[in-house]
Image (cartoon, helix red, strand yellow):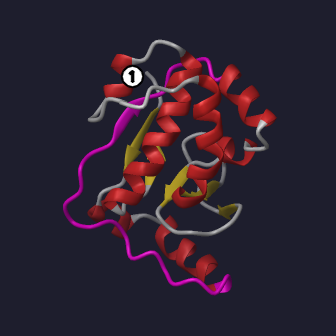
């Protein structure tokens, strides 16, 4: 059994315990609530391959370790991590990270590792097409940010 990064559908988000808590935190920051994903969105699903060490190392070099602690990526612009008291797939809290803010640290990392410009898209496309763990994770986070922003949907790990 592996871990997957997937989009959250409109119906699931409406029932998600994180939705009202995220709205509260955003309000305290003077931001409007995230309205949730649109009813019809393109699916995003990638299986995480085991070894993340090289990606963690390059993130540390670029001062981007915060994104490694995120368990929820949302298409809302805010700084840092928002910690929500809801259990996630791998922790006793859910840490939300902005998809907009994910783009900035990934761009120089992508350039450094030589991430291909023409990444495959579609469910499990990266999992199937990319063997190198470092390139895979850079591409995964790049595609996750782009998908979240393009389709207005959050992503989480299951």
In the picture, measured across the screen, residue 42 lies left or right of residue 69, that is left
Which one is in front, 65 or 100?
Answer: 100
Residue that protrudes farthest toward the left in the picture: 40
The stretch in magenta equals 28-52
Image quadrant where one finds the N terminus: top left
The rendered magenta stretch, by its main secondary structure, is classed as: loop
In the rendered structure, does residue 155 fall within the stretch colored magenta?
no
Q: Residues within 10 Å of mark 1 (few under 14, many from 20)?
A: some
In-image side of 158 versus 58 (left or right): left
Is residue 85 visible in the rendered image? The answer is yes
Where disc 1 sits, the SS reads helix
Nearer-the-camera pick, 109 or 86? 109
Judging depth in this view, the residue of 50 and 144 nearest the camera is: 144
State the residue position of label 1: 127
Residue 158 in view here: no
Q: Position of residue 62 (x, y in %)?
A: 76, 39
Residue 126 placement (x, y as % from top left): 38, 26
Residue 49 is inside the magenta segment: yes
- Quadrant assignment, res 101: bottom right
The residue under the point 66% across, 46% down is 105
Question: Quadrant where the C terminus lies?
Answer: top left
């Amino acid at each position: 059994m592996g871990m997957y990064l997937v989009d959250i559908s409109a119906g699931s988000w409406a029932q998600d315990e994180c939705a009202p808590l995220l709205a509260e935190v955003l309000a305290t920051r003077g931001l409007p609530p995230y309205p949730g994903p649109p009813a019809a969105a393109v699916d995003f699903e990638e299986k995480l391959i085991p070894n993340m060490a090289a990606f963690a190392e390059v993130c540390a070099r670029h001062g981007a370790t915060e994104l490694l602690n995120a368990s929820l990526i949302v298409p809302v612009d805010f700084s840092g991590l928002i910690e929500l008291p809801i259990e996630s797939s791998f922790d006793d809290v859910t840490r939300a990270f902005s998809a907009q803010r994910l783009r900035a640290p990934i761009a120089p990392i992508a350039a450094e590792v030589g991430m291909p410009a023409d990444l495959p898209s579609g469910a499990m496309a990266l999992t199937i097409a990319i063997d190198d763990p470092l390139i895979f994770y850079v591409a995964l986070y790049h595609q996750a940010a782009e998908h979240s922003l393009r389709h207005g949907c959050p992503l989480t790990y299951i």
